[in-house]
Amino acid sequence: MTQRSVRSVLVVLFDDVQSLDVTGPVEVFAGAAMQAAEGRAGGGPQDAYRIRTASLDGSPVRTSSGLTLVPDAALTGEPPPHTLLVPGGQGTRDPDPRLTDWLRENAPRAERLVSVCTGALLLAAAGLLDGRRATTHWGVSDHLARTYPAVEVDPDPIFVRDGNVATSAGVTAGIDLALALVEEDLGRDIALTVARHLVVFLRRPGNQAQFSAQLTAQTAQREPLREVQQWITEHPGDDLSVESLAGRARLSPRHFARAFQSETGTTPGKYVERVRLEHARRLLEDSRDGIEEISRTCGYGTPEAMRRAFVKSLGTSPAEYRRRFHAPARPARQQPTH
């Protein structure tokens, strides 16, 4: 990692901003700066962040939850930052034209442009996402695609990087994106330490879906089908064939398959595939189990079957996925001496 000057982070504030879109990433960058400072004190120089907030005229803004945020300055007086962060919130639906104009003129001067949640609507309104791949909160993905057809909207991932522009999905996905940027800037150790302080995973990969299998699929209305959904989640390594699941629901295989898809919006096979993939990813990220053992635990049977599922869904092998996202074991807690 090359040494460089402190990175400036400028957070744009406006009325009806979503407070967590602001405070989540700010806590990540601030925590990273503190860890970097400790690294310098210990003899290991690191990059750090200088965080500022600004509204159009420097006035306080009221968030959508009723909190008041007092900015450091007015946007018009701020120099181009390293990272310009644009949060989301209800205020993005009918933004002040002056804010859109300011973004159109000034955002390209930032080295890195980041949006959280519906902040992507502001970037798109300023023409900053034209010809780029981007994501946003699942609830406004269709609106973003319809309103700004020049934007390649991907509604599934929790964040997307396209050159120096990064967009994230709803609310807490901004924390995942900020952790990814810290890891890129300062290294995995600092990002992992910050994640642990915030009690979040390090880190959900950007291509992870905004919803788990349980959230993506609808919850079945009939109790036997709901029980089958829960069974699949708790027993990914069991026999989850349509015949076996139909028997558990006391239905014929044909009736079960039709009823399951009708009530959940997906087929039993696709639901099982997603549950197994999510379970395997968690084990690769958090456990020390071998790939062969994980493939059996998750119902793939063989490492090759799991590898095919990973390549198909994620474009990478289980081994490479673990290399990128496995969290090192925490150091053993020292026992107090008496």
Image: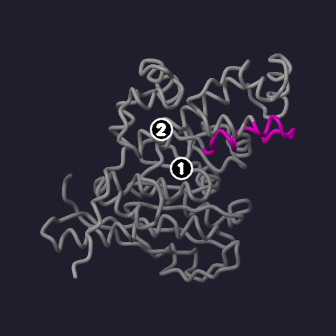
Give the residue pinned by disc 2. 281
Q: Is residue 253 shown in magenta?
A: no
Question: Which amino acid type is marked by label 2?
Answer: Arg
- Residue at 44% in and 57% down: 178
- Residue at 44% in and 32% down: 294
| Camera-side residue of 112 and 254 | 254
Q: Picture quarter containing residue 238?
A: top right
Q: Residues within 10 Å of mark 1 (few under 14, many from 20)?
A: many
| Residue range (magenta) | 210-227
Q: Residues within 10 Å of mark 2 (few under 14, many from 20)?
A: many
Give the residue pinned by disc 1. 167
Question: Which amino acid type is marked by label 1?
Answer: Thr
| Camera-side residue of 311 and 48 | 311
Residue 40 location (% of width, % of height): 18, 70
Vertical position of residue 214 compared to residue 87: above or below? above
In the displayed image of the protein, which residue is found farthest to the left? Answer: 43
Vertical position of residue 275 compared to residue 18: above or below? above
| Camera-side residue of 146 and 293 | 293
In the displayed image of the protein, which residue is found farthest to the front? Answer: 338
